[in-house]
Amino acid sequence: MEDWKPIETAPKDGTKIRVKRDLLHESVHWSHDLEGWVTGPIPVRDRELRRLLPWEPTHWTQLSA
């Protein structure tokens, strides 16, 4: 069973985590330069695409190994 914690306690050191809000779930990491939770990086041609999470998560958990 996943151990969901309040988003305020989530690591903001680049660690990839799983976040949720209601029925929404996403794997993200905190970006200091974008000041938000981002998905990616996703390789696109000769660069990497990162996308800010378009919703505010309420809880987080570690990614399963």
Image (tube, rainbow, N blue to C red):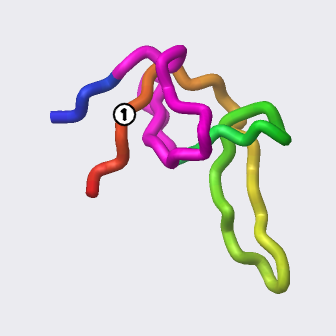
Image position, residue 64 (x, y; %):
28, 51
Image position, residue 51 (x, y; %):
75, 50
Helix, strand or loop for disc 1:
strand
Q: Which residue is mark 1?
A: 61
The quarter of the picture where residue 57 lies is top right
* Residue appearing at x 64%, y 58% in the figure: 40
Image position, residue 3 (x, y; %):
25, 27
Is residue 57 shown left or right of residue 31? Answer: left
Numbered range of the magenta stretch = 5-26
Is residue 22 shown left or right of residue 34? Answer: left
As rendered, which of 32 and 20 lies closer to the eye?
Answer: 32
The reply to whether the magenta stretch includes residue 20 is yes
- Tag 1: amino acid: Thr
The reply to whether the magenta stretch includes residue 18 is yes
* Residue appearing at x 50%, y 26% in the figure: 10
| Residue occupying the far left of the picture | 1
- Figure quadrant of the N terminus: top left
| Neighbours of disc 1 within 10 Å: few (<14), some (14-19), many (20+) | some
Is residue 53 shown left or right of residue 27? Answer: right
As rendered, which of 16 and 58 lies closer to the eye?
Answer: 16
Residue 2 to residue 16: above or below: above
| Residue occupying the far bottom of the picture | 45
- Figure quadrant of the C terminus: bottom left
How many labels sit on residues? 1
Residue 29 to residue 42: above or below: above
* Residue appearing at x 52%, y 45% in the figure: 15
* Residue appearing at x 47%, y 34% in the figure: 19
